[in-house]
């Protein structure tokens, strides 16, 4: 479309202005993390200063960031893999061997996602306490897998729906069994979809704060718990707080940037083509 | 299908039955001497507690406000970022970044670095213009929570709606322009109808997460001041793990589940019509 120069300049300014506005809190967090503690609370805020990494070193020494980060990676990956392992066969049979109840089952599964976790917090807490699962990585992996299962099944279902049934039938003619049909035909065909489903699940697990705050204390605690501990009076150390926050967010942020294109496909449930 | 649906069923039914069971019990973790069947006492206590009704209202206010803000602004921003301008790719990545920030961190940044009355950026700006800084979480607690949650979810709405806008047929728009349809008319009669499916997806996914907002409130206001920002999720948390009243918390849980079902009923119905299953 033809646009006058002023229109183009206006759109550029608006687009960049809004992008920077939305990004500003993150930028400010990184900036503050590089200040000294006195510099971080200077009024008016410092814009020019000598950056230092001392806050990051302090955080690692006091709270052992790496242990929490390792828990986060382990639990997010574990939870997502477990969810996919359950969801792939479920979505397969719903997409290719639908029954009259499939549609109802799908909608019902999605509606279970709307039940607030607090509704079942007490029983789960007591179950975990009695089973010795409180503050274990395994306990959180199971919870996260179950938590994301409805969305994961839904997404996989919409991706599988796009695969023509004839391809699978041809495989069956050649004597493929159900498992090899899923493994050698369906999975390669829908790999982008499975990947974006896994990505979303990973992000949701990484950022999940309700179950991790309530079910872990120290041993299996992921980064969300690590960060929440900085909201106590300790949190008044702004530079350390910012350093801890930056360290907790950086891995998933970079991961998100790199995978945003794949992610969009999954997030829209195939509804936006 | 059987194993994973069975797992889901167990996951939903077992805690649900336990929650309903506990909601009819006298059960306090701190006081083992109290016990036995409570009848509807826990529910009676709940509905006569003014905090409960406030929390119900807060939950709906939070849900409705964030939905209106994110879908409204998200649509406008999606149209804006669909335009071609220098550096659009980078600007877009910056704009969607907040979605990847975990809720606890988002809450901490906004609470301490942005909205802190003395050291926050907002305070500094107010000072610069000669105004008294505002203590956001004390004076406008709910608005502050809405601001933080909207900041997290606006990029999500933008991401989805942008994809939808980009799939819009350019020839169609061109034709509308030939018929001398104005920018506003194009937006309302072509872009918006095209976006309706994407908008319902955004509303559905956001509702799932907004009904259960917890970390943002836990970190910033702890439901306060008073009960100004206590939503149902936080109320039940406080009952169960701060007051150790399992019976009362379970009654709240049952109410939360009923509420979710009411919302889910209407939402899933309207979404199901738009999604081809």
Image: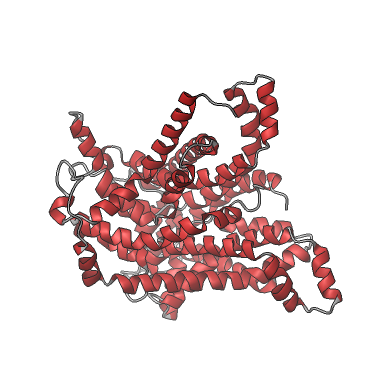
Q: Is residue B258 left or right of residue A99?
A: left
Q: Is residue A32 above or below residue B146?
A: below
Q: Write the residue at 45% across / 61% down.
A: A255
Residue B243 seen in the current view: no
User: Residue A111, relative to residue B226: is it above or below?
Assistant: below
In depth, the one of B90 and A266 nearer the eye is B90
Is there any visible trace of residue A182 in the rendered image?
Answer: yes
Q: Position of residue A213 (x, y in %)?
A: 36, 64
From the viewer's perspective, tell me whether residue B202 is left or right of residue B218: right
The quadrant in which residue A181 appears is: bottom right
The location of residue B98, given as percent across then percent down, is 41, 50
- Number of marks drawn: 0
Residue B217 or residue B148, whichever sits in front: B148
Residue at position x 19%, y 46% in the image: A48
Q: Say which quadrant the N terminus of chain B sits in.
A: bottom right
Q: Can you give x and y, in whole percent of width and height, for residue A139 in the image?
A: 45, 75
Look at the picture and state if A56 lies above or below B165: below
Q: Is residue B193 left or right of residue B259?
A: right
Residue at the extreme right? A173
At x 39% / y 69%, what residue is drawn? A215
């Amino acid at each position: 479309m033809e646009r006058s120069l002023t229109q183009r300049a206006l759109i550029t300014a608006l687009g960049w202005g809004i992008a920077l506005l939305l990004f500003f809190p993150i930028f400010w967090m990184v900036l503050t993390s590089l200040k000294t503690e006195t510099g971080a609370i200077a009024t008016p805020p410092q814009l020019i200063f000598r950056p230092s990494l001392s806050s990051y070193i302090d955080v690692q020494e006091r709270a052992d960031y790496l242990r929490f980060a390792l828990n986060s990676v382990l639990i997010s990956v574990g939870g997502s893999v477990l969810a996919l392992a359950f969801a792939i066969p479920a979505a397969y049979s719903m997409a290719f061997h639908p029954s009259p109840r499939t549609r109802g089952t799908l909608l019902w599964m999605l509606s279970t996602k709307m039940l607030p976790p607090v509704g079942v917090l007490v029983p789960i807490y007591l179950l975990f306490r009695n089973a010795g699962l409180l503050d274990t990585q395994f306990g959180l992996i199971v919870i996260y897998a179950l938590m994301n299962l409805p969305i994961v099944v839904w997404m996989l279902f919409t991706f599988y729906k796009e695969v023509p049934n004839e391809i699978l039938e041809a495989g069956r003619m050649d004597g493929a069994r159900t498992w090899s049909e899923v493994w050698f035909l369906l999975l390669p065909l829908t790999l982008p979809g499975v990947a974006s489903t896994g990505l979303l699940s990973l992000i949701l697990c990484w950022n999940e704060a309700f179950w991790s705050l309530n079910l872990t204390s120290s041993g299996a605690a992921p980064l969300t718990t690590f960060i929440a501990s900085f909201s106590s009076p300790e949190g008044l150390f702004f530079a350390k707080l910012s350093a801890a926050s930056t360290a907790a967010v950086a891995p998933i942020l970079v991961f998100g940037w790199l995978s945003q294109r794949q992610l969009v496909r999954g997030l829209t449930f195939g509804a936006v083509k | 299908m059987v194993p994973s649906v069975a797992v889901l069923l167990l996951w939903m039914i077992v805690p649900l039955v336990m929650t309903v069971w506990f909601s009819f019990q006298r059960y306090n973790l701190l006081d083992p001497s109290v016990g036995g069947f409570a009848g509807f006492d826990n529910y009676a206590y709940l509905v006569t507690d003014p905090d409960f009704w406030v929390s119900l209202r807060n939950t709906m206010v939070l849900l409705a406000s964030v939905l209106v803000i994110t879908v409204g602004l998200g649509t406008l921003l999606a149209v804006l970022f669909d335009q071609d301008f220098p550096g659009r790719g980078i600007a877009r990545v910056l704009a969607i970044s907040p979605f990847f920030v975990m809720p606890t961190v988002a809450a901490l940044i906004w609470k301490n670095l942005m909205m802190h009355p003395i050291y926050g950026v907002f305070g500094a700006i107010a000072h610069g213009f000669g105004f008294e800084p505002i203590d956001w979480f004390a004076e406008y607690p709910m608005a502050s929570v809405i601001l933080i949650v909207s900041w997290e979810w606006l990029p999500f709405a933008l991401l989805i709606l942008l994809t939808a806008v980009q799939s819009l047929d350019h020839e169609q728009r061109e034709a509308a322009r030939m018929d001398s349809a104005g920018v506003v008319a194009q937006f309302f009669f072509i872009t918006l109808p095209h976006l309706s499916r994407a908008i319902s997806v955004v509303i559905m996914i956001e509702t799932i997460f907004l009904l259960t907002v917890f970390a943002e409130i836990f970190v910033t206001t702890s439901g306060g001041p008073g009960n100004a920002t206590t939503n149902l999720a936080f109320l039940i948390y406080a009952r169960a793990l701060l007051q150790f009243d399992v019976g009362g918390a379970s009654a709240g849980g049952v109410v939360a589940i009923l509420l979710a079902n009411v919302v889910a009923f209407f939402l899933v119905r309207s979404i199901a019509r738009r999604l081809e299953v």
